[in-house]
Image (cartoon, helix red, strand yellow):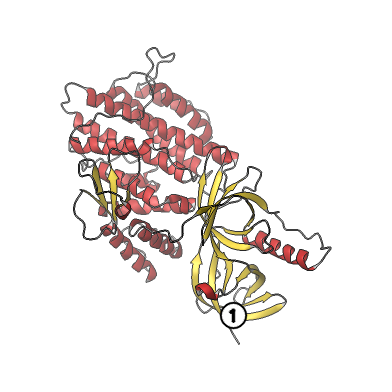
Amino acid sequence: MNNMALNLNIPALLEHPVFIAETRPQKIHELLLELNTQDPLDIATHLHNELETLNRQKVSPNQRMQALDCYRTLVTNTTSALVTNYINSTLPLEDKAKSAALACEALWLELGYGYKLILIDLQNQLIKLGTDKSSALTIQRAMHAISQYALAHYQTYQTPPNHIWSDLHQLYFCAAKLGVIHTIIQDEPTQIQTKNYAYLLTSIEDTYKHTLLMSLAQPHHLIQQDISAITNYLAHHVSAARITAIEPLENSTGAFIINLISDAPPTPYNKQKAAPDPDSELLLHTIDLIRDIHEDLNKLQNRTTPANGSISPDANPNDYIELLAYLIKNWGISPKRFFNRSAKIGDIEIVAGTDDIHNIINTTQIVTTISNPEPNASNSPPSRWKILNISATGISIRRYHTAEKNIKVGGLIALRGKNESQWSIGLIRWANCGTRDRLDIGIQLISPYADTATAQTFQHGSNSNILVLPEITAVKQAATIIAPRGTYINGRQLAFTCNQRTEQIMLNKLIERTHEVERIQFSIIQ
């Protein structure tokens, strides 16, 4: 693979464009100052039109670079403002969130086009004297735009198009040929740099590794805020990950194969069917990165904040303890699936959120015990979803377009099949959105049924709806309660009332915490 012509995803250039793009920096600045709107969506539309015009016509690399540099800071600021519209959204996205996400994707896609067009022109020049430094900056900027484009997909639970991977691999290979993968490329500080992780990625290699590792973090398993937290956290540590040529490995833990001629992200070494090809493949090693994360995790568990700046002293340590444990699992030993999935045809009813689950279980019990129940009805009626496949511990389902729009990764969910009387309890483990509000979710089943209860914490004196999950001796699963996030303190005492009986309990083990609930093991105080 000594030579490879660039075959990047770029738009076709028009021979006779209707509008001639403005490339004079002074004029562009004046035009941008005339934008008399504060609405990020309007600014995004204007910027997109300008970039689209610029990227469809022949312009010298130098002029294109100057024009793009004028737009780039505003693109960064505008997309940061737009992200707030979908960073905390339920799924599928409402119209406002969807418009903001599409605008972000479109802006980063166009900005990336611009830098890729410059690189192709620089590479096609007959006399390349002094172009290496310009090429290094151009590659870094193109990679950054592609990584932001991918991030917008991750935060809206979509799979980025495959072309991003072939582009990234080609850009990296081109930089390696030019000998510039480690060249320090310092961005001019802008107002936004303080809250943007990108300023920490000062080389092409670090930007490339950051984008690869974000894909390996399996963002569709995370809530949107955690995806943002990881992008920032990783930027402080990414230099610890290494890329090498294919080499013999004693242990494949933390080793991933990058195929430079593919349009795919890296894959775990231990999932390879054939021996790696040293001519077209590289190794990404994460073992030193994992070691760094372990150190940060130990500090957090000992109630100190890491001094390296990767975690803000104001951050909630519990959030990061869970996040770092998750990263160690995904960037270290890739999890194996223990049960095969089998396709299943049919529909299933679901209810999401603790209070609605509480109501539906109570309503169902009333219906089964009384012939004419009071129309207490649950706040939110069950919605019908299509079953995609089922395994021993989980199920994946697809939303019908009429179903509720209140899904979040990490959320609590109750499910009931066609002829079932009881509601099973599960947690939403991943989401995948598509066009026209398509939404697939994966659910881990944690209990075949639950009892509803009202808990009173002696410390707070306030009542909360909780669920009591039974002991399941077959899989050695102790009885647990599911309570609002923030309930668990080791040794804390609670009183809960279930089936008209009040129990005094002590909380003694946190099984799991998600963004909205905690699952806690307890013992009854006699």
| Residue 203 can be seen, yes or no | no
State whether residue 165 is above or below residue 134. Answer: below
- In percent of width and height, residue 420 lies at 67, 61
- Between 430 and 118, the one lying in front of the other is 430
Left or right of 489? Residue 327 is: left
Q: Which of the image's four quarters has the N terminus?
A: top left
Asked which secondary structure carries label 1, the reply is strand
Left or right of 426? Residue 121 is: left
| Residue 436 can be seen, yes or no | yes
Q: Quadrant of residue 326?
A: bottom left
- Residue picked out by circle 1: 505
Left or right of 469? Residue 51 is: left
Q: Which of the image's four quarters has the C terminus?
A: bottom right
Q: Residue at x 17, y 25 (%)?
A: 128
Identified by mark 1, the residue type is Ile
- Between 270 and 401, the one lying in front of the other is 270
- In percent of width and height, residue 354 lies at 63, 62
State whether residue 11 is above or below residue 146. Answer: above
- In percent of width and height, residue 159 lies at 45, 42
- Name the residue furthest right: 372
Q: Residue at x 64, y 74 (%)?
A: 456
- Name the residue furthest bottom: 526
- In percent of width and height, residue 78 lies at 46, 37
Q: Residue at x 84, y 63 (%)?
A: 372
- Between 518 and 63, the one lying in front of the other is 518
Pointer 1 local density, CA inside 10 Å: few below 14, some 14–19, many at least 20: some
Q: Residue at x 60, y 66 (%)?
A: 448
State whether residue 286 is above or below residue 158. Answer: below
**How many circles with numbers are drawn on the protein?**
1
Q: Quadrant of residue 297?
A: bottom left
